[in-house]
């Protein structure tokens, strides 16, 4: 009897997916969720192209305009802060207006900021174009975008898909860092800025034609789950975003997740992505060589993030985070001793090691948000991501100031290593959410 009931339920769940007539028994059908995941992956690559530029342009802008590294770092920090602060509101806007519309507007905004920067002549313009426009645009395609897509389109394989989509940023770095470094070296920084603007625009028709907001739009159930009707557009997106923050802020796990992720942002986007190239250049390494090393981080970032998603489906996310942060902190403490004019084996080992750990923290952090906050997890993760970018923004600015004051980046590497050790301890004390016991059904009195 039980098997019959389960079989009937399975047939009912699959019924919406069968609305498209079959063209033959041998035809292999790919679930539409995977197509949406591919579109999301490509979109993040296009939006992330601009993130490859800041570290490459610090020295050229300093040379051409005489702006201090602190001024340039401030513009980068505005971009990173807005990237994070926009993310939770973007997740709510996607619930209100749909994923496709929000992402198309975001890509267009990124392209506008990158194009406008070609004609800038003052540092305040750098802060408007790089900081404000690009920050708002890329923030709307941040990891909260990945979380929204994953929550709507997948029930099974969520950890794996999260890892793959997180790796999209690294893939963009892998593609655009060597290209932009070569353009900057051979043709100057302006053509490089135009290149990333065009990359964002090229993705727009791809998103508009292939992206769908919800599985119900095409009569499907989410991958690995049962059919769910598309909910009505959620009004009051801003109010809901703030309300979710207020509710989450009353819980201890939120502050621990936000704190650890702030340190994650400080030690990756704020530190390595922004200051690794100029720091290596300080030691005599050519910009193209340093940028190529940063791109190699992207290669192993993809491997590490996807593998981390696989691990997150199988192991305690808190312990995974503790291991990731501890290993990252140790590697940063050794980095100042590895800087040299040429690439040597110990530096290559650091690049591989750091790349595997770069954003491996994302799948377990998102899993803990989902565990703690359920249906609001995408917005909560958006706020946690905001802390990630605030941490990145602080180090992007303070790292430049430290270089101006001390003449080197050594102090910044050591301080970031200590912060990562703190994050490892914070991850271990996150409490697991108690599972709600299932109600006991009376069997009758006889």
Image (cartoon, helix red, strand yellow):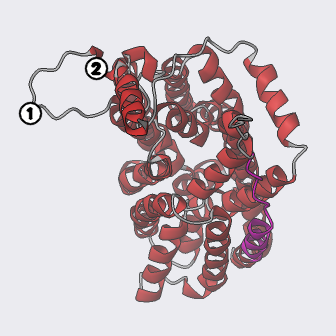
Q: Secondary structure at mark 2?
A: helix
Classify residue 329 by image quadrant.
bottom right
Residue 1 percent location from the top left of the image: 41, 35
- Horizontal and vertical percent position of residue 307: 44, 63
Q: Tell me which corner region of the image, top left, top right, bottom left or bottom right, holds residue 376.
A: top right
User: Disc 1 designates what residue?
Assistant: 26
Image vertical order of residue 77 relative to residue 149, above or below: below
Q: Which residues are magenta?
A: 418-436
Q: CA distance from mark 2 to mark 1?
A: 15 Å
Cβ atoms at labels 2 and 1 below 8 Å apart: no
Quarter assignment of residue 202: top left
Identify the mark nearer the N-term, 2 or 1: 2
**Does the segment drawn in magenta span residue 310?**
no
Q: Residues within 10 Å of mark 2 (few under 14, many from 20)?
A: few
Quarter of the figure with the C terminus? top right
- Eyeballing the image, is 329 above or below 134? below
Q: x and y percent of residue 134 in the render?
A: 60, 34
Left or right of 268? Residue 172 is left
**Which residue has dot 2 on it?**
18
* Point 67% across, 25% down: residue: 92
């Amino acid at each position: 009897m039980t098997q019959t009931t389960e079989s009937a339920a399975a047939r009912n769940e699959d019924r919406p997916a069968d609305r498209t007539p079959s063209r033959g028994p041998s035809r292999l059908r790919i679930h539409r969720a995977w197509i949406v995941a591919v579109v999301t992956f490509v979109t993040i690559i296009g939006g992330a192209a601009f993130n490859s530029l800041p570290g490459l342009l610090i020295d050229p802008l300093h040379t051409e305009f005489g702006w201090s590294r602190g001024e340039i770092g401030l513009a980068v920090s505005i971009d990173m802060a807005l990237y994070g602060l926009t993310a939770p509101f973007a997740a709510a806007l996607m619930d209100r207006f749909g994923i496709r519309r929000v992402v198309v507007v975001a890509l267009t905004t990124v392209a506008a900021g990158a194009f406008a920067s070609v004609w800038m002549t003052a540092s305040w313009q750098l802060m408007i174009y790089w900081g404000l426009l690009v920050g708002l645009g890329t923030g709307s395609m941040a990891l909260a975008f990945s979380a929204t897509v994953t929550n709507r389109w997948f029930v099974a394989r969520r950890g794996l898909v999260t890892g793959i989509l997180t790796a999209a940023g690294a893939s963009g770095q892998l593609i655009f860092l060597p290209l932009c470094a070569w353009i900057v070296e051979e043709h100057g920084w302006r053509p490089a800025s135009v290149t990333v603007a065009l990359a964002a625009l090229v993705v727009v028709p791809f998103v508009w034609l292939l992206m769908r907001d919800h599985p119900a739009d095409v009569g499907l159930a989410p991958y690995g789950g049962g059919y769910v009707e598309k909910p009505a557009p959620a009004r009051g997106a801003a109010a809901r975003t703030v309300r979710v923050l207020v509710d989450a802020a009353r819980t201890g796990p939120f502050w621990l997740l936000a704190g650890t992720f702030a340190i994650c942002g400080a030690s990756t986007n704020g530190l390595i992505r922004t200051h690794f190239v100029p720091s290596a250049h300080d030691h005599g390494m050519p910009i193209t060589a340093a940028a190529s090393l940063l791109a190699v981080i992207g290669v192993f970032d993809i491997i590490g993030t996807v593998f981390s998603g696989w691990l997150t489906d199988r192991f305690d996310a808190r312990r995974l985070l503790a291991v990731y942060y501890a290993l990252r902190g140790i590697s940063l403490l050794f980095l100042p001793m590895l800087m040299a004019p040429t690439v040597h084996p110990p530096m290559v080992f650091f690049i591989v090691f750091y790349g595997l750990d770069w954003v491996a923290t994302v799948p377990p952090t998102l899993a803990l948000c989902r565990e703690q906050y359920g249906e609001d997890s995408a917005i909560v993760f958006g706020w946690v991501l905001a802390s990630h970018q605030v941490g990145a923004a602080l180090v992007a600015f303070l790292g430049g100031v430290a270089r101006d004051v001390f003449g080197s980046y050594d102090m910044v590497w050591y301080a970031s290593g200590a912060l990562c050790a703190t994050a490892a301890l914070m991850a271990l004390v996150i409490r697991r959410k108690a599972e709600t016991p299932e109600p006991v059904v009376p069997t009758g009195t006889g």
